[in-house]
Amino acid sequence: MKAYCFKCKKQQEIKNPEQVVLKNGRHAVKGICPVCGSKLSRMGKAS
């Protein structure tokens, strides 16, 4: 799954993706950018 990295300024593949549920009940996927190491997140369930 890919997410936009604000440091790299392009779509990156999420490293170590983790399915989470936010406070409002929505699903999201969180992980790390493999290039720069910053945090990435994307709304929706992992496929």
Image (spheres, rainbow, N blue to C red):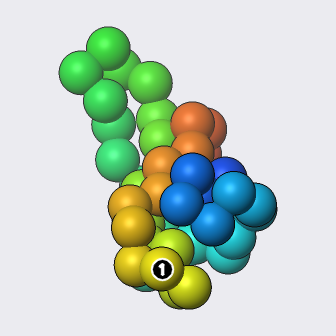
Looking at the image, the residue that sits furthest to the left is 23
Looking at the image, the residue that sits furthest to the top is 24
In depth, the one of 34 and 18 nearer the eye is 34
Q: What residue is drawn where x is 57% and y is 36%?
A: 43
In depth, the one of 35 and 45 nearer the eye is 35
What number of labels is visible?
1
Secondary element under disc 1, as helix, strand or loop, is loop
Q: What residue is drawn where x is 67% and y is 75%?
A: 13
Asked where in the image residue 32 lies, by quadrant, the reply is bottom left
- Compared to 34, does 40 lie above or below? above
Instruction: State the quadrant of the C terminus.
Output: bottom right
Q: Position of residue 40 (x, y in %)?
A: 47, 57
- Compared to 30, does 34 lie above or below? below
Q: Position of residue 26 (x, y in %)?
A: 44, 24
Left or right: residue 17 versus residue 23 is right
Mark 1 sits on what residue? 36
Q: Amino acid at mark 1?
A: Cys
In depth, the one of 16 and 27 nearer the eye is 16
Q: Residues within 10 Å of mark 1 (few under 14, many from 20)?
A: few
Instruction: Please indicate, yes or no, whether residue 29 appears anywhere in the rendered image.
Output: no
Q: What residue is drawn where x is 48% and y is 49%?
A: 41
Q: Position of residue 7 (x, y in %)?
A: 54, 60
Q: What residue is drawn where x is 34% and y is 47%?
A: 20
- Compared to 36, does 25 lie above or below? above
- Compared to 22, does 47 lie above or below? below
Instruction: State the quadrant of the N terminus.
Output: bottom right
Left or right: residue 24 versus residue 41 is left
Looking at the image, the residue that sits furthest to the bottom is 35
Instruction: Please indicate, yes or no, whether residue 23 appears anywhere in the rendered image.
Output: yes
